[in-house]
Amino acid sequence: MTGRPLVDWGWVVGHLDDIALATLQHLGIAALAVGAGFAVSFGLALWSVRDRRVYGPITAISGILYTIPSLALFAVLVPFTGLSVVTVEIPLVAYTLLILVRNIVAGFDAVPADVLEAANGMGYTRGQRLLQVELPLAIPLIIAGLRLASVSTIGLVTVGSLIGDAFGGLGVLIKDGIAAFFPTKIYVGAALSVALAFGADIAFIRLQRALTPWARARISGR
Amino acid sequence: MSEPVLPQAGLRFGPPPDAGRDARDNAGPGPRPDARDNAQDNAQPDPRPDAGPDARRAATVEFEHVTKVYGPADRRTAEARPPAAVSDLSFVVPAGKICVLVGPSGCGKTTSLKMVNRLIEPTSGRILIDGVDIATEEVTALRRRIGYVIQQVGLFPHLTIGENVAVVPRLLGWSPVRQRERADELLALVGLDPARDRDRYPAELSGGERQRVGVARALAADPPVMLMDEPFGAVDPIVRDRLQNEFLRLQDELAKTILFVTHDVDEAIKLGDLVAVMAQGGILAQFGPPRDILASPASDFVARFVGADRGLKRLSLSRVADLELDPVGGPGPDTAGTAGAASGRDAGAGAGPSAGTTAAATPDLPVVEPETTLKDALSILLDAGAEAGLVVDRAGRPLGLVRVEAITARMRT
């Protein structure tokens, strides 16, 4: 290792397409996990909002899931789902639930009671109220949850490289770098993973700004 | 649409319970056949000769033995809740009138109000709007026909002011152009500037402005009935007074049937054509015009609730213009004497001797407007230590003199 530069830029330049592919794969796996996690969490959160009794058990179960080490979960899943993308996605999705369910429920809880009463009194149907009043007002907290979930998922995707080179994204670079004593791959993989996490975070902040123009009025208001 | 009405009409002709008949007979110019006619008007787009434009804008609201008891399922939060929140409530609010429900907290006034748009369902009894039992109507359709204003306003923070006002028109499927025109029209009506305020968000408005938007929003689909739950309770007294005056001016124009909840007796007296005083347990302690309630409280409870100063309160029912004013500068020795005494207080120079000439010669008299209530006028005169005040119109022209004596005489009648 001695004498070699920290990052072998020659290798980087020569493998740009591999790196790009790994980055895209990484992003794809993470997006699928956050997307699926959001869909599941949204359903669970709506259920919790309608029936408070299920909220405790739902958060307890997702909390337990959150504590299971990903390696252990892989080991349990492989006999059932094989060395497939499903095996990678299940833990990733499971880890998003705790954050997302809590934030979505908190988002709906944050809708002021007077707003709900006004909506009911003016003749919104339940569905209209949900989609046109509660959901828009819950957006800031929902997106806060998505930011957390996406950042942690993007970090976790690297672990998928243990299942196979097709499922680890930038983690494959890191794994190979460790195996070959080639730090460049480790640094590139880690740096891009961090960059993806930052990028996702910024993208969600932008999305939130675009979706909640009224929140800025609050700050500039008198 | 005609089907749900017919069984109603049948029910209405069934043997009426006595209390219900009493309430109707006392309060309503609309005996039951009329109410039935109205119901049919609603059912068929065939306007009857006696149903003028007013009949379309406002509707009779009738409580028939309405009782609300919170069952065990509803009681989770308050174990000590009295068994009935509203007990056997019967009264009629004729079309175009303001009925104020007033009483101490826990008297069921808000519960009663919320039963009209079915945010709360009565345990027993019926509420009829233009003779139609609201329980037979589709609940969202019913609510879209009833304006609803609450104390916290409940504007949608994520919608602009214009969008907030147009909420019910949008739910009713109006075209975007019509929604926008209607929103602008209403913003102007409640004293806001559509061009400036339409695209702002609620967070950018003051409390008073928000409350106006709340009223505009409730009026958007021109509902025949409005429910207002302490709409002016959260603004400071000066803004409240202004909003109340604007509200009365608006009502002169719109003539809606309004049910208005407050815990403030003065507000009830000022705004109500009819006042329903409610006691703990949702019992109707007295129902009638404010004048009657102040003049002859039906019980000790009502007397206590309206206050020992009810003579004074009655003054707030009359305005300076209702009194016969003494002429300004008239040759009557009485007037001259009064004016002289009033101005002589701090004007030994000039005013005293020349009293009885012109208003300009009595610059020290407190000035009141014809629209000022007698209560306020009395307060102004007492504050100034004057025996009389100068009544001037908007342009500042003197109309006459109002004397303390004339006001206090009014208090005793």
Image (cartoon, rainbow, N blue to C red):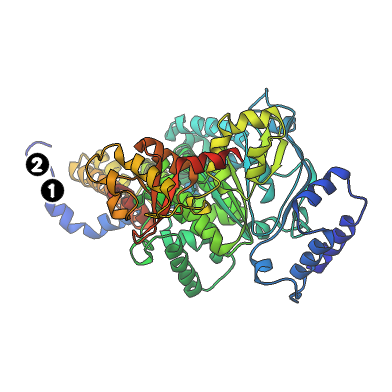
Badge 1: chain ID = A
- Give the residue at x 38% y 47%: B336
Residue B253 image-quadrant placement: bottom right
Which amino acid, by three-letter code, is at mark 2? Arg
| Residue B299 falls left or right of residue A116 | right
Quadrant where the C terminus of chain B is found in the figure: top right
> Would you say B408 lies left or right of B90 here?
left
* Residue B254: % across, % down: 56, 63
Residue placed under numbered mark 2 in the picture: A4
Image quarter where the N terminus of chain B lies is: bottom right
Q: Nearer the viewer, residue B136 or B285?
A: B285
Amino acid type assigned to the residue bearing label 1 in the image:
Asp
Judged from this view, the residue extending furthest toward the right is B15
Q: Is residue A129 above or below residue B85?
A: below
The mark found on residue A8 in the picture is: 1
Q: Nearer the viewer, residue B66 or A141?
A: B66
Percent position of residue B312, x then y: 53, 36
Q: Using the rendered image of the protein, determine whether residue A49 is visible from the camera's viewpoint.
A: yes
Marks 1,2: beta carbons within 8 A: yes
**Chain letter behind tag 2:** A
Distance from disc 1 to disc 2, alpha carbons, whole Å, reads: 8 Å
Residue A112 in sight from this viewpoint: no
Tag 1's secondary structure? loop
Secondary structure beneath label 2: loop
Residue B225 lies, with reference to residue B384, above or below; the image says: below
Whole-percent x, y for residue B285 in the image: 71, 35
Q: Are marks 1 and 2 on the same chain?
A: yes
User: Relative to B379, is A4 on the left or the right?
Assistant: left
